[in-house]
Image: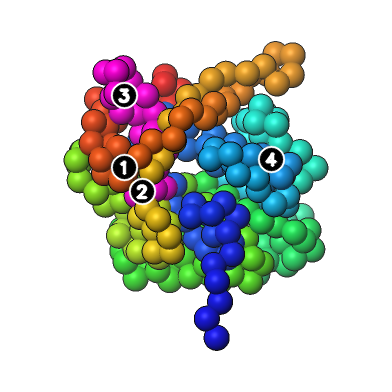
Amino acid sequence: NPTPIQWLWRDWLALGKLHILAGAPGQGKTTIALAIAAVVTTGGKLPDGTRCDEGNVLIWSGEDDMADTLLPRLLAAGADKNRCYFVEGTRINGELQSFDPARDMLALEMQAAAIGGIRLLIVDPVVSAVAGDSHNNTDVRRALQPLVDLANRIGAAVIGISHFSKGGQGSDPASRVIGSIAFTAVARVVLVAAKVKGDDGEQCRIFARSKSNIGSDAGGFEYEINQLEVLPGIQASHIEWGKAREGTARELLAESNDDAHSDQSALKE
């Protein structure tokens, strides 16, 4: 029988589904995902002012260190750290091996079930779930399917973080997600983060939906990335949400100037 979509954040994040969050370097994609994770851990307010059901979050990061990057950003966003769990790898013969999705997905599911109450899983970057060629549709679909199945079985929303390819302003933002088109085809919702010219001609950042198979795909939010001292001597980036914006992602990002900064590293940004 048909069943209604269960939402973590109505029209933005669906429980049991895969979402892609993409953008150019330096747009705070990981920080945005962690800001949403923090709201989930406390049952706090989402950018549109609605409240989120409280739950646990599971974070699998191949790029950032837990102790000096991820945890400080979660604390800066007001997360309950007792509800934050991290995928570090698998211990084989006493040695810690990095997480291998082809080998370790069942172990991850068992851990998720043991923790219980996981409402959000972040995979950063989502390409780390692909053992084969990330530009090959068949390889990507095959690699993402266990992640989609995992989301469905544990009833968690999954955010996979990706990058934009260079060039292509004015085109559909979802088509700029790097790698095979299967990433955006398999995802039910594609979220994008970009720097654009604001109404007043000044630069601002926009978080928007570029594609949704399960709800509205228009509208977005302005945001800023600020630094916060979470503990003495420990700085972390932090998202400040701004006003809601009308329009499609293509319209909102038409003035995107990502490529003017494409040689900027996230560090310089």
| Res. 134 mark | none
SS assignment at label 3 = loop
SS assignment at label 1 = strand
Choose the circle earlier in sequence order: 1 or 2. Answer: 2
SS assignment at label 4 = loop
Range of residues picked out in magenta? 191-210
SS assignment at label 2 = strand
Question: In the visual, does 60 lie left or right of 250?
Answer: right
Kind of residue at disc 2: Ala
Q: Are marks 1 and 2 in contact (CB under 8 Å)?
A: yes
Choose the circle earlier in sequence order: 3 or 4. Answer: 4
**Residue 149: quarter of image:** bottom right
Choose the circle earlier in sequence order: 1 or 3. Answer: 3
Q: Are marks 3 and 4 in contact (CB under 8 Å)?
A: no
The C terminus lies in quadrant: top left
Kind of residue at disc 1: Gly
Choose the circle earlier in sequence order: 4 or 2. Answer: 4
Residue 184 against residue 232 in the figure, above or below: below
- Residue under circle 4? 44
Name the colour scheme.
rainbow
Q: CA distance from mark 3 to mark 4?
A: 28 Å
| Res. 247 mark | 1
Image coordinates for residue 111, horizontal then vertical, percent: 74, 62
* Nearer mark to the viewer, of 1 and 3: 1
Choose the circle earlier in sequence order: 1 or 4. Answer: 4
Kind of residue at disc 4: Gly
- Residue under circle 2? 218
Image coordinates for residue 91, horizontal then vertical, percent: 72, 56
- Residue under circle 3? 198
Q: Is residue 102 magenta?
A: no
Q: CA distance from mark 1 to mark 3?
A: 13 Å
